[in-house]
Image: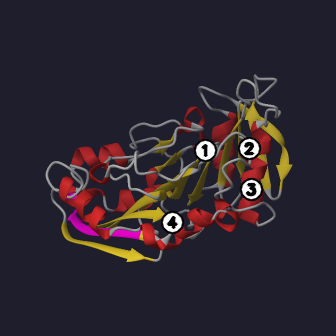
Amino acid sequence: MEQTRRRFLTASAVLGTGAMAGCSTVTDAIPFIGGGGLGNYQQWVYPADQFNQDADSLNFDGTNQKGIYDSRKSFYPSTYSSLATNYGAVGLTGRSVSMDLGLPEGRVLTGSYDTAEVVAELEDDASTEYESDGSYSGYELYVPSDRDTPSQAVGVSDSAIVFGQRVEPGFGSDWDAVGATDVVEGIIDTKGGSGTRAVNENDDLATLVNALNSGTSVSGGTRADEVDSDQADAESGVFDGQVASGQSWSVNGNTTSRQWVFVFDSEGDVSTSDLNDWVEANDTGGAFTRARNVKVSQNGRAGVVTAKIDTYDLFR
């Protein structure tokens, strides 16, 4: 479970990554727009099968890139380099983005930006030039100008930038492909409240999100099936009865708080003994090598592990 950065690559061709220096069209003088940071990320998360009707599990990954940038001097240099992101096609750098939320078929950015400059970057992107495709619920929609069937689309408003990719049915599936623009509109509807939010229909996800701290980074997901005894391996962090899991970390200067949450089918399935076995198996060369104040607890049908670590040692 230890990782420097778990990124969803959907829409990566749209966004682009690279060094932060010299890439932004945004200045510190532009006021903050979009608010909320990672505090409301769950309002964007749609049901697993909303676009891909064959999907039976859901993953999400949210990062406050501005928080990472603001704490850059506290990280080990190569760790900061691996965490930092810039967003080429829309002309943003990490210091401008308060929430970068990866979803199975899309991505959402909120933060500080000038909408007109974002649009100008899209329309003049060196790799994929975008053109207007109408508007929807306060967002202006853009698609690649050189494709009859766009594989990706972007929605831009003062509050968020939403990316979506076309979803094709798998072999033998009996549902039709979902256009990239439809995906963007569906994500917008989810946040706006007219679409279904995953936390409102999936109790496992709701339990996970309610237990997770909304820190500098948060990620997690549900499983298609409950882990059975044959699949379980406590030392690897896979537990009997587990139905969802996630983690978060939050930087506070030179100290970072970390949290891991495992959701089980019932309260009786939670084993703090198994969680302690996982901690002990990873206290040398794993997630807890340099950790301190490690605590294991139960919160309903969630098992929770928390720890603190020097920010400089995070992911080293």
Q: Residue at x 64, y 58 (%)?
A: 45
Mark 3 or mark 1: name the one nearer the start of the chain: 1
Q: Which kind of residue does numbered mark 1 sit on?
A: Pro
What's the residue type where badge 3 is placed?
A: Ile
Question: At numbered mark 3, what does the secondary structure look like: helix, strand or loop?
Answer: helix
Residue under the image location 37 percent in, 58 percent down: 68
For residue 6, side relative to residue 162 (left or right): left
The answer for how far apart the CA atoms under marks 2 and 1 are is: 9 Å
Q: From the image, tell me which residue sits under label 2.
A: 51
Q: Secondary structure at mark 1?
A: loop
Residues drawn in magenta: 303-312
| Tag nearer the camera, 2 or 4 | 4
Of labels 2 and 1, earlier in sequence is 2
Q: CA distance from mark 2 to mark 4?
A: 22 Å
Mark earlier in primary sequence (4, 1)? 1
Location of mark 4 (residue): 208
Q: Depth check: 227 or 253 in front? A: 227
The label on residue 188 is 3
Q: Position of residue 95 (x, y in %)?
A: 44, 56
Badge 2: how crowded within 10 Å, few (<14), some, or many (20+)? Answer: many
Q: In the structure shown, which secondary structural element does the residue marked by tag 4 occupy?
A: helix
Disc 2 to disc 3: CB gap under 8 Å: no
Q: Main secondary structure of the magenta part?
A: strand
Residue toward you, 159 or 101: 101
